[in-house]
Image: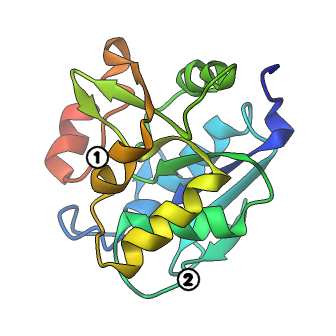
Amino acid sequence: MPMLIKSNINAYILAGGLSRRFGSNKAIYKINGVTFLDKIFTTLQSNFTNIFTIGKEPYSEKMKFVPDFTDSQAPIVGIITALRHTTSLWNFIISVDMPYITSDIVNLLQKEIIDVDNNIIIPSVNKRILPLFGLYHKNCLVYFEKAYSAKNYTLMNVISPLRPKIIDLSPYNMKLRNVNTFEQLRKSDK
């Protein structure tokens, strides 16, 4: 199976969280005058034609907005919303708290679509799996919806039985870090 071109994969930026630990909305927090959301969007433009943001409200006019299907606050809600919305078989999903990613890192995951038997392609960094930076096949939707119906909101509980392809991207740990607190942001900017 040849690698899919960028127009065949939709990208979804999950921006529906409350940002409690951060203390303000991460989607609209600015680094060097650019919001986390717009920074990720700009990065993803070289990888994808169709880029959407998912959440409770739109935070940027640069991309199309897809509202969460429920008011519940959990990453599984964003993934379900994306997989219900998509017209693509493969979909890139990223959390808004990863503003330091680069298109090269996204390319490393996209290259893994060739001959993959798995429904999910996600990275690990220093043996820690990052489920909110990955490629999800549309056929995963039924598993996420079943878990949500059973009030099983823990992503790894849903992902593990699906035998995801896990790519070690430990050399890129600084670019794949989540920013959940101002302290983490301050350390990242050094």
Q: Secondary structure at mark 2?
A: loop
Placement of 52 over or under 69, stated as above or below: above
User: Would residue 86 be found to the left or right of residue 162 on screen?
Assistant: right
Q: Which residue is mark 2?
A: 69
As drawn, which residue projects farthest toward the top? 171
Location of the N terminus by quadrant is top right
Placement of 143 over or under 98, stated as above or below: below
Specify the amino acid type for callout 2. Answer: Phe
User: Would residue 151 be found to the left or right of residue 183 on screen?
Assistant: right
User: Would residue 187 be found to the left or right of residue 86 on screen?
Assistant: left
Specify the amino acid type for callout 1. Answer: Val
Label 2 neighbour load within 10 Å: few <14, some 14-19, many 20+: some
Q: Quadrant of residue 19?
A: bottom left
Q: Which residue is mark 1?
A: 179
Res. 190 in view = no
Q: Earlier in the sequence, mark 1 or mark 2?
A: 2
Q: CA distance from mark 1 to mark 2?
A: 25 Å
- The residue lying toward the viewer, choosing from 154 and 115, is 115
Location of the C terminus by quadrant is top left
What percent of the width, then of the height, locates residue 88?
Answer: 78, 51
As drawn, which residue projects farthest toward the left? 183
- The residue lying toward the viewer, choosing from 100 and 93, is 93
Res. 112 in view = yes
The numbered dot on residue 143 is none
Q: Quadrant of residue 128?
A: top left
What percent of the width, then of the height, locates residue 133?
Answer: 46, 41
Q: In front: mark 1 or mark 2?
A: 2
Q: Secondary structure at mark 1?
A: loop
Label 1 neighbour load within 10 Å: few <14, some 14-19, many 20+: many
What percent of the width, then of the height, locates residue 102?
Answer: 54, 27
For image coordinates 42% across by 47% down, the residue present is 132
- The residue lying toward the viewer, choosing from 55 and 39, is 55
